[in-house]
Image (tube, coloured by chain):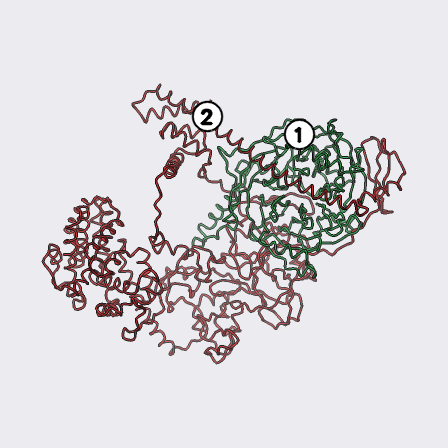
Chain colours: A green, B red
Amino acid sequence: MPPSKARRKRSLRDITATVATGTVANSKPGSSSTNEGKQQDKKKEGPQEPDIPPLPPVVVNIVPRQGLGCEVVEGLLVPSRKREYKPNSKYTVGNHPIYAIGFNFIDMRYYDVFAIASCNSVIIYRCLENGGFGLLQNYVDEDKDESFYTLSWTIDQVDSSPLLVAAGSNRIIRVINCATEKLDKSLVGHGGSIHEIRTHASKPSLIISASKDESIRLWNVHTGICILVFAGAGGHRHDVLSVDFHPTEVGIFASCGMDNTVKIWSMKEFWIYVEKSYSWTGHPSKFPTRNIQFPVLTAAVHSDYVDCTRWLGDFILSKSVKNAVLLWEPKPDKRRPGEGSVDVLQKYPVPKCSLWFMKFSCDFYSNQMAIGNNKGEIYVWEVQSSPPVLIDRLCNQECKSPIRQTAVSFDGSTILGAADDGAIWRWDEVDPAASSSKPDQAAAPAAGVGAGAGADADADA
Amino acid sequence: MASSSKASDSSQRSKRSDQGMGKDAAAASVVPIHANLTQLIRQVQSGRLAYIKEKLEVNRKTLQRHSCSLFDVAAAAEVASRGTDGGNALSQRAAERQCGSDLANGIGERDVVSVQEENLATGTLALSSSGATAQRTIVRFVKLPLVEKIPPYTTWIFLDKNQRMADDQSVVGRRRIYYDTVGNEALICSDSDEEIPEPEEEKHFFTKGEDHLIWRATQDHGLNQEVVNVLCQFIGATPSEIEERSEVLFEKNEKHSGSSDKIESRLSLDKTMDAVLDSFDNLFCRRCLVFDCRLHGCSQNLVFPCEKQPYSFDPDENKKPCGHLCYLRFPQWREGFKEMHDDGLAGGATYTMESGTASQRVDVNVMYESEDSNRQKGNIRSMTLVGTSGSKIISSVSAEESTTTPSADISETENVSSDLPPSSLRKHKISKHGPRYREHSPGKRQKVFTSDISFEGNIMNKLSIPEIRDTRLESRESGGDKLRILDESTKKTSRKDMCGESPATTMENVGRQSNKVSSTKNFLESTLSCWSALERDLYLKGIEIFGKNSCLIARNLLSGLKTCIEVANYMYNNGAAMAKRPLLNKSISGDFAENEQDYMEQDMAARTRIYRRRGRNRKLKYTWKSAGHPTVRKRTDDGKQCYTQYSPCACQQMCGKDCPCADKGTCCEKYCGCSKSCKNKFRGCHCAKSQCRSRQCPCFAASRECDPDVCRNCWVSCGDGSLGEPLARGDGYQCGNMKLLLKQQQRILLGRSDVAGWGAFIKNPVNKNDYLGEYTGELISHKEADKRGKIYDRANSSFLFDLNDQYVLDAYRKGDKLKFANHSSNPNCYAKVMLVAGDHRVGIYAKEHIEASEELFYDYRYGPDQAPAWARRPEGSKKDEASVSHRRAHKVAR
């Protein structure tokens, strides 16, 4: 891999190599750092300040149990070829790495529309049925130094025009109305670059953003209000890299970051503020923004940066830079907040995936997960089966550059990968039986989508 | 194979341990265990697989349901929008564009390649794709207009008071990777390998599966060496841990399988005072008067002041009965109690002089006796416990007897007690306690009578009671000789006793016995025996707080548990017992009467001292020269300041050379245990007119804020005066040196700095030397600060502030708005470390008159080699320039 000049995120490989000779390499996940910290404290305080006891820890890092009866089911790296994909087209956007790519799952009319974020521009495309791309819209920030890191689709709650939310190094969240092709709002408040934005599936006005300033903010894009800030004594101790709303339980979300932890937060007690934000008529800065300092659970499942987390029902899929995605179950203690246990259930190995800021994505039904690696390959896992099944490994001689982010279409028939060299790769399913029911993207996406859903439902029944 | 070799090894070990078993037999027994356990493990593992599978299946179904409902909602919305409007806004526009842009240009080399061209001149973006459907799409750039960015910051929490760093917030010993924003360099900001300690051998945590394995294995094969060894191979735990765990599991299963758990109803009352007060002692901060203090932490050293507040004691004559169960309503008790009340006041002090020396002697004797065997010692202990409670009963009974049946004497026990020469009794205020003492003999007779009618095991107990008590009496009189003889007899009885019953049950028996005897008598006798440990401790606390005032004790501390008459009765009997044996050994559990004595004595001493001191105060005229402690002034005079962290000493009375405060060079403060006349104590100021705002004031000169508890004329009025002015001290003088303590700060505004990044601004104009606010933050150790400083220097924004020899303030994540005040070499503010009520705090003061909404600057006063590049230049800015320094940058107060 050539040393890229413009890549923001730096390879961790050299670092992990040097550290591997140290102590952290073979220690248990999560436990190492906390224990060492404590010991150091004791050692330090031993002779110097014997009569001053340290304050108790603010947050208990919950480490998964290991041993008999707590085994993790690991998937085999043998492609099952349940579905086969062929490379369809390569699309070169520019020289800059593409950090974000995402289909619009919020609005059914645009299930075939996706957007990418690269450098200071956000571009919207359509997946054409012939395997190509249709360029739709292009937004460029006037600030040349801006670098968009993340985007998310949402919908205007009044006239249901599609909205695109994007943010990056400038710490400003841009809300773009794609129907009018105009900037709708700019949300200012974060003190550091924004690493990820997610939209609430059933309440699309709510978005959460994860930032370098160690905080997570909940916004209402309809009124432009920052409703809640999740940071403080129990919050992340380093950049927050990824967030995701719980799919079914309203007011629960997970976050992860450079402090190696995954935190689960609840805003249930502050839901009144969320409701208030919809009807707020005053200036957004006058809104009584509240600060939530303590998460429901802090899990030390990984021992390095955790750069992507997604809910899978009540379970969490999370990924560190250790060549694997983990599926685990958080079990927060209802009576004692901050305590509980975690149970790691399954492991999805992804070879050569040691860079950070590599994110995975799932289709609408969370059946398939696609994740790229350093070598330009994409691993497609069937996440909900036990043991996990590798559907396919997508590779191409010409694709060598790391794939930062993937996008899986509504039914999983199309997989897009956004590479560091500024190219988008498109893979389409080649199964002849499935090709008939493949979404007819140009004319009526709903029909194809319905068929896909029906097929899924049949398989389930 | 490793496992098989281990197995044979274990078999050899088992052979060694069990000589009777042949080698073949041992090997034969190990193999099935091994196979059996392997099978068990497989079972557990397959169970786990099934469990995961089931969980995922359940999860998949709920998720599927949810996604489908979400899809239905979206579909409905889609249908609705299609019917009404143009519907697909995006596709419409796209269609238009595709019609307009039909310049088909086959520039691609492959049919799968699309190339996007950016034409900055025209502001368009062109998409060209080649192949069968060669086409070219051109869209216009839509510009996103510039929005003013806010300066970067890390989310921080407001603190109105410094906090100590919590255990998990440390960066020491952790690996942290830092990414340079400019050069894309990855750096590791962590300790070298030597600094990170090896993780110590952790205690094995048993999982459910492992529990199951151990349980099944021990059930099938019993708990022996082989099984444990084989288990060790499968579970990564030591043999002792496995054995321990199997016992735990056994107990758990036993409990589960049947034997009903006895629920103790009055569980809380069975605890001792120490256990109940544990959370109070550990979590309550006596300096900040809050629970869970974030500044001083929990489990502080308990410092008990040697001076106590005097309690007001109403004479009996003026007192009204506190209720229908007040001791005053029982005329037959009144006289005795009154005597006791008086006795408690007057007699307390005289006893302790003797008890101080005598109790030691007894202690030695007891130890000597019990050298023979620990078991006997244990027995003696248990006996003495009984002895105390027993004696209470006895005395209560005797008291009753004394009023009703004055008939006395002639019993076996009388012989024992008559060993005591009457002259010795007289030594002990026979005038007062003699009669009461005599009353005890019928009690003893009663006891023996009781034991006669009870079964044998109890006889032993009963017999030992008077003996032990008498032992103590003996020792008081004639040293060791008689004690030894009597102890011999005690030992005999206690050996017979075999310690089969716990002291508690023995006590219960005693209670029952006494009930039986005095069933016809007053209700008091029955209740006397059931004073629980907690009630006794509460009673002692009551004595400490209120003195011998049964009304107040019963009402305030034992409300709902004991009535006034019960308390009074208890007090009376205790007093009697105390009078008889003033040299109770503290090491003997259940003996607490001496504690009571101590409280009384301290009380008396404290009061006399206070009176004495008050008198002296008027005569002495304090000047600032005499008031300030020399060490403090020396440090303030010192150009290079280093403040020393204060922690209260627990010295009683006067602090000597070994006082930790004197050792460290700090003054004793009001939180120390030592008395107010301690020589090391800072005595505050006596300023009259200077408002404590100049170096004339000893407090000000010593960089301390005045303390209304310590300084004579510095006081605070509270409220708006509508409730009446408080008594003014020092001619309406207002102290100007308590701003940090009273939080009388100026309104600070946060805004975009004129220099760099964020800045702090003042809302209202202030004068020179006015207090603006406090620089708050997390209190971290110097070592921690070094580590954090490395990280902060990389980010080029440090909020560290040297506080004293122990702590550095870090306002990075926690602080207040003054942390954003920028550095200037020509500042308008200055920072000063003040000692406020024992804590060092950083105050920011105006160096000159500052107009409203001016930005605040102060000199960070970096150490000469620590200053970052921008701080060295005259008009340096704080954040945006690159740091050259590799040392951590600290702010230092003047």
Q: Residues within 10 Å of mark 1 (few under 14, many from 20)?
A: many
Q: Which mark is residue A391?
A: 1
Examine the image and state in which quarter residue B395 appears: bottom left
- The residue identified by callout 2 is B38
Please tell me in which quadrant of the rendered image residue B156 appears.
bottom right
> Can you name the residue that lies furthest to the top here?
B24
Count neighbours of disc 2 (C-alpha within 10 A) and say few if under 14, some if 14 to 19, many if 20 or more. Answer: some
Q: How many marks?
A: 2
Side of B856 where B167 appears, left or right:
left
Left or right? Give the position of B687 relative to A83.
left
Whether B280 is drawn above or below A69: the answer is below
Could you say which is closer to the camera, residue B212 or residue A406?
B212
User: Quadrant of the rendered structure where residue B311 is?
Assistant: bottom left
Disc 1: host chain: A
Q: Which residue of the protein is positioned furthest toward the bottom in this rendering?
A: B731
Q: Amino acid at mark 1?
A: Ile
Q: Position of residue B853 (x, y in %)?
A: 67, 68
